[in-house]
């Protein structure tokens, strides 16, 4: 059983590493970004509401995200554990998660911070070529990360539940560090 929160700036490798580790642990990777992109591509009610925020590199309003998470963590496959990738993204979402887990009688093991220097991030993101990876949107996403998401590092460190991993290594090296962290 593992319940992990992946933290880190856009381009840190959260998605890639969360997917790998979730697969190894046989638990779901819960990526709010993926769920939102699916909703946008299917033009659902959620997708229509979320799209303009995503295109600008802004956070989608908490109200929309919190319902997604509540529903997802209540799915049967999430009983075995989960890796949260891209949530929480601000302190309000982190507080919501605490309350939700308390209501569900669960807790998380660690917040895992993938640390990568700024100059590496922009290069990586430009190479990725996703729709929201145009340079101006990248810069906005990094700014939003600094303002709203980075405070979560202090939030989880203060609880002694932050594990920092050097994300400025090859994907294999990062994966090896993560495996060690979960004793695989
Ligand atoms: P990501 O795939 O995690 O980089 O997310 C892509 C985009 O989806 C972000 O730039 C936000 O617009 C939106 N998004 C993903 N997760 C969240 C979240 N937890 N809260 C608000 N917006 C989110």
Image (cartoon, rainbow, N blue to C red):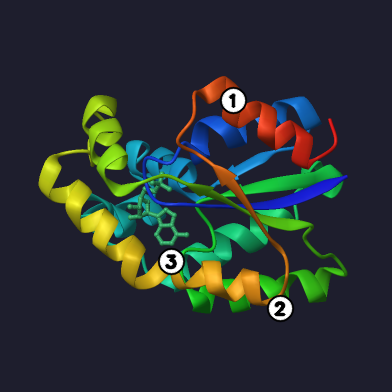
Q: Element type at marker 3? A: loop
Q: Quadrant of the N terminus?
A: top right
Q: Which residue is mark 3?
A: 150
| Res. 181 image quadrant | top right
Q: Which residue is mark 1?
A: 173
On residue 18, the disc is none
On residue 99, the disc is 2
**Residue 144 coordinates in the image, percent (x, y):** 29, 64
**Residue 164 coordinates in the image, percent (x, y):** 61, 52
Residue located 55% across and 73% down the image: 154
Up-down: is 31 above or below 159?
above
Q: Is residue 20 visible to the viewer in this orientation of the structure?
A: no
**Residue 38 coordinates in the image, percent (x, y):** 42, 38
**Residue 105 coordinates in the image, percent (x, y):** 88, 70
Q: Is residue 140 shown left or right of residue 115?
A: left
Residue located 43% across and 66% down the image: 150
Q: CA distance from mark 2 to mark 1?
A: 34 Å
């Amino acid at each position: 059983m593992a319940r992990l929160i992946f933290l880190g700036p856009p381009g840190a490798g959260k998605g890639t590493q969360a997917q790998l580790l979730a697969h190894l642990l046989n638990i779901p990777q819960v990526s709010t970004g993926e769920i939102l992109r699916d909703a946008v591509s299917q033009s659902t009610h959620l997708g229509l509401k979320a799209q303009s925020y995503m295109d600008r590199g802004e956070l989608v309003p908490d109200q929309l995200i919190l319902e997604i998470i509540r529903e997802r963590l209540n799915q049967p496959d999430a009983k075995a554990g989960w890796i949260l990738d891209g949530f929480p993204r601000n302190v309000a979402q982190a507080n919501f998660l605490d309350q939700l887990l308390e209501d569900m009688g669960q807790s998380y093991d660690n917040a895992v911070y993938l640390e990568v220097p700024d100059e590496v991030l922009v290069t990586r993101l430009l190479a990725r070529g996703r729709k929201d990876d145009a340079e101006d949107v990248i810069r906005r996403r990094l700014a939003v990360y600094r303002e709203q998401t980075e405070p979560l590092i202090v939030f989880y460190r203060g609880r002694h539940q932050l594990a920092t991993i050097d994300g400025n290594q090859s994907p294999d090296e990062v994966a090896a560090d993560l495996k060690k962290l979960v004793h695989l």
